Amino acid sequence: MKNQVEKVQNTPENVAQPEKNVEKKGHDRKKVFLAGIIKDNPVLVMLLGLCPVIPATTSIINALMMFIAVLFVLVCSNLIISLIKGIVPKEIRIPVYIVIIASLVTVIDLLLQAYAPDVSNSLGVFIPLITVNCIILGRAEAFASKNSVLDSLLDALGMSIGFGLACLVIAIFREFLGTGGFTLTNPFNSDQSVSWLPLKDLALPVMVQGIGGFLTFGIIVGLFAWITKSKVPGKNSDTTLKSQYSTLKEIEACRKEGKETK
């Protein structure tokens, strides 16, 4: 009987099972990382976090610095929240997440004020507003609080890169059409800059204003939807939207529990 059990346990199918599980995990993690860049792009597909997108895309440098700020906050917040998810009471998790995010935003805001004052002045209040950016809080609640540290890191990197690429593409179009070229300035030393303005006389200043930002954003979203064969922005993000919907239901349930306790 023992020999029969050993034979069953050592069959090629059972030996190959761990390898299949490892491959599946690797494939799933690849999906988690790539989802934020293409399928569930936070800006071009889910249309989230648009508050800083329009004002931060007047130039490539501003878009790049906003990307770095969001990358820092999203990666750090996802890691911290994933680490403490088991010890934070369910009833107070949202305030705890906001405190963590606000602390990280304060750090990046002070660093920009100290080492890149011109960029800090240009972006203004939109750096502190990262605290309430729905991308950051949404990923914390919908993903980081329910998954491992590694998966949360990959999710944060994917979403940040997706956000940054969207901002950079919009900024390239707006700066070129609005100024007739590009001006790259050292964010840490405004005296160092390089300009290339071949179409300066044909520039459209309206493109670096608010209306130009919305116009460019709409065109880019439409092109992205067409390229990815999505008839409607958000069609490819069903899973993420369902997750966010369940998160809203959980928040509402927590509020009801709090009222009943009172």
Image (cartoon, rainbow, N blue to C red):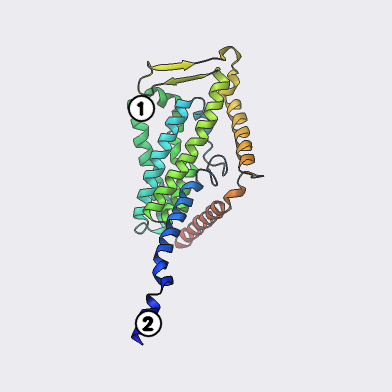
Which amino acid does the dot numbered 2 rest on? Val
Judged from the image, the secondary structure of the residue bearing numbered disc 2 is helix
Which amino acid does the dot numbered 1 rest on? Gln
Of all residues shown, which one is farthest toward the top? Answer: 201
Mark 1 residue crowding within 10 angstroms, few (<14) / some (14–19) / many (20+)? few
Q: Provide the residue designation for mark 1.
A: 113
**Cα separation between marks 1 and 2:** 68 Å
Q: Residue 74, image x and y in percent?
A: 41, 43
* Figure quadrant of the C terminus: bottom left
Judged from the image, the secondary structure of the residue bearing numbered disc 1 is helix
Q: Nearer the viewer, residue 137 or 179?
A: 179
The quadrant holding residue 45 is: top right
Of all residues shown, which one is farthest toward the right? Answer: 231
Mark 2 residue crowding within 10 angstroms, few (<14) / some (14–19) / many (20+)? few
| Disc on the earlier residue, 1 or 2 | 2
Residue 5 badge: 2
Residue 252 badge: none
